Amino acid sequence: MPPIPAHIAQIDRPVPQLMRLYVFQALATTLAFPVMVVVLYFRYHTMRYQFTNEGIRKSWGIIFRHEVMLNYARIQDIHLRSNLIERWLGLARIDIQTASGASGAEMTLEGLVDHEAMRDFLYSRMRGAHEKHPAAAPESPASGLAPVLDEIASELRAIRQLLEQRRHE
């Protein structure tokens, strides 16, 4: 697998525009603003990313520490989302889904400016992980099916001959 591009490997924290987005989100809660701005402030300042050859690691939180490690091979689908304020700030969220059965995303990458390059990188790693163990090449119908059908036909002939012998006895 090719090495991780430098512009992806150096990402370890979200960009400052994410904190602005968090302030807008906290303002939208009106009465809960003081609590939400503190929660989102600590989320922003503790959020860390790590991109390795095996997968992505995201961690955040002080009191309740969250850490998610997601292997590229587990990625099933990638969604790029951004609302009006996120687009105005030059941000987008990348929702990464796996086959875990959950309806939501397994991991959301947020606070990334070059989100399209990140999406393309994840698609290439996702495909590369799945192509690591390619399925056996299917046999052509003539080479795999014909001998089996010949064997079945000869067995049916033998059965028919036995039945005819028993009927004549």
Image (cartoon, rainbow, N blue to C red):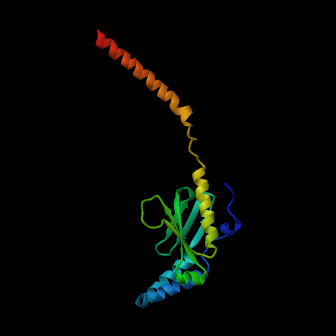
Q: Residue reaching furthest right?
A: 6
Q: Residue furthest top?
A: 169
Residue 163: x and y, percent?
33, 16
Image quadrant containing the C terminus: top left
The x, y position of residue 53, in whole percent, is 63, 58
Give the x, y percent position of residue 162: 35, 15
Q: Is residue 56 visible?
A: yes
Question: Which of these two is toward me, 103 or 141?
Answer: 141
Residue 73, picture quadrant:
bottom right
Question: In the drawing, does residue 115 fall left or right of residue 3?
Answer: left
Can see residue 34? no
Image quarter of residue 14: bottom right
Q: Tell me what residue is drawn at x 60 percent, y 49 percent.
A: 132
Front residue (pair 4, 77): 77
Tell me: residue 25, above or below residue 158: below
Question: Residue at coordinates 59% horizontally, 56% vertically from top-left?
Answer: 127
From the top left corner, tell me how far across and down residue 145 is, in percent: 51, 32
Residue drawn 60% across the image and 63% down it: 122
Residue at coordinates 54% horizontally, 77% vertically from top-left?
Answer: 82
The quadrant of the rendering that contains the N terminus is bottom right
- Total labels: the figure holds 0
